[in-house]
Image (spheres, grey):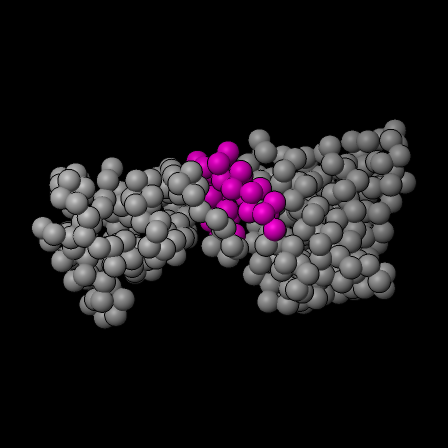
Amino acid sequence: DNAQLHGEACIALRNLAVDENSVDSIISAKLDVLVLKIMQKHSKNLVSHDTDAKGNEKVLLHSCELMRQLSTVQGHKNDRHRYIGLGIIKLLVTLMHAHKDSIVIKYACCEALNSFLTASAWEIAPNSGVYMGEDVIDEVLDVLQGSRQFSKVQYISVLCIDSMLNNQDLDKRSVKRLGHSDVSDSVIQALRIHCKDGFVVQACFSVLSKIKVVYDIELVELIVMALQKCMKKKNKGRECTLLGMNIIRSISSESDFKKALIDAGVAEVICHAMKRYSKERDIQVAACMSLYNLVSAFGVTSYNSFNHVKSNLQDLDVTRYVEEATSRFSDCEEIQKASPVIERAVASSTFSFLLTK
């Protein structure tokens, strides 16, 4: 029951668990199993308002981090399945549920949980008969919704959702649960609050690119704003730009939505991306195909509409960016296909290629 002693022991094990040999020693001595039991013990102590609340919290924080380390050290990633068999996911979900008021515990649990969510068959808590898939999703959502102001917690909880979506072994019930509107709404809210944080934006964009989302003008404007704020960041700038461009590429193909996209400033952010990441093939492809989608099958509108955008087109200098991409990536079929269509549309006096600032 000595929380201080257990806390220091977990810290010592964390310091040891830095390479394969050290982890081998910890596992051989079955200290990892002992740590799981200690986690359960101190969680109960904390819930029952044990006198040493800080000590119990310290044990939980460092034990969660230790389990994450043990499962991610090179050569030991397969141990994730063994820990799942020992009930680690159920334990982490229980901890998250029991300690809703502790941001630090929720963060530590989500960080540990994320390292296990990519393992197959995580949705079943072995030996308990308890179905875990939807419980995990609900608990992660609860953390996401209950920690809006904390960007690190928002990031790791959205990352948990992304890891579940990346799991090829995800069961049908969990897939269906992830498709519910409260998931997309929670992720969009995280993006709205932390649109300047490259880590949060990358995680949110990654999730939004994998789930069904109803895009309206407000959401498109939010995506554009997040792209503008994160595109130049050293950390995650490239990743945010690529994911954002691919989202824009996807939704720009919807013919009835093109005017709204353009009004939201999509054209400018595409040009900024093409200028900043001129040597990044994937970004150039997504940007060119987005422009291609915007001009394809748009039809001729009134001369008033066309004249309204002509000066803006010249300001954006779309053709220059497309020509540069065409020249640099001469072996790319998609860019070679898109560029003449875009250039004809921009040069045409009868084709309204609607781009506005």
Q: Is residue 230 left or right of residue 269?
A: right
Secondary structure mostly taken by the magenta-highlighted segment of the chain: helix
Q: Quadrant of the N terminus?
A: top right
**Observer-nearest of 270 and 235:** 270
Picture quadrant where residue 195 is located? top left
- Evaluate whether residue 230 shows in this view: no
Queried whether the magenta region covers residue 204, the answer comes back as yes
Picture quadrant where residue 163 is located? bottom right
Q: Position of residue 302 (x, y in %)?
A: 17, 45
User: Residue at coordinates 82% horizontally, 59% vertically from top-left?
Assistant: 130
Q: Is residue 12 left or right of residue 196?
A: right
Q: Magenta segment, which residues?
A: 180-207
Q: Position of residue 150 (x, y in %)?
A: 58, 33
User: Residue at coordinates 85% horizontally, 51% vertically from top-left?
Assistant: 37
User: Residue at coordinates 79% horizontally, 51% vertically from top-left?
Assistant: 91
Q: How many marks?
A: 0
Picture quadrant where residue 324 is located? bottom left
**Observer-nearest of 298 and 63:** 298
Q: Position of residue 246 (x, y in %)?
A: 38, 55
Q: Position of residue 65 (x, y in %)?
A: 68, 47
Considering every residue shown, the one lying at the far front of the view is: 302
User: Residue at coordinates 80% horizontally, 34% vertically from top-left?
Assistant: 55
- Evaluate whether residue 132 shows in this view: yes
Q: Is residue 118 left or right of residue 105?
A: left
Queried whether the magenta region covers residue 342, the answer comes back as no
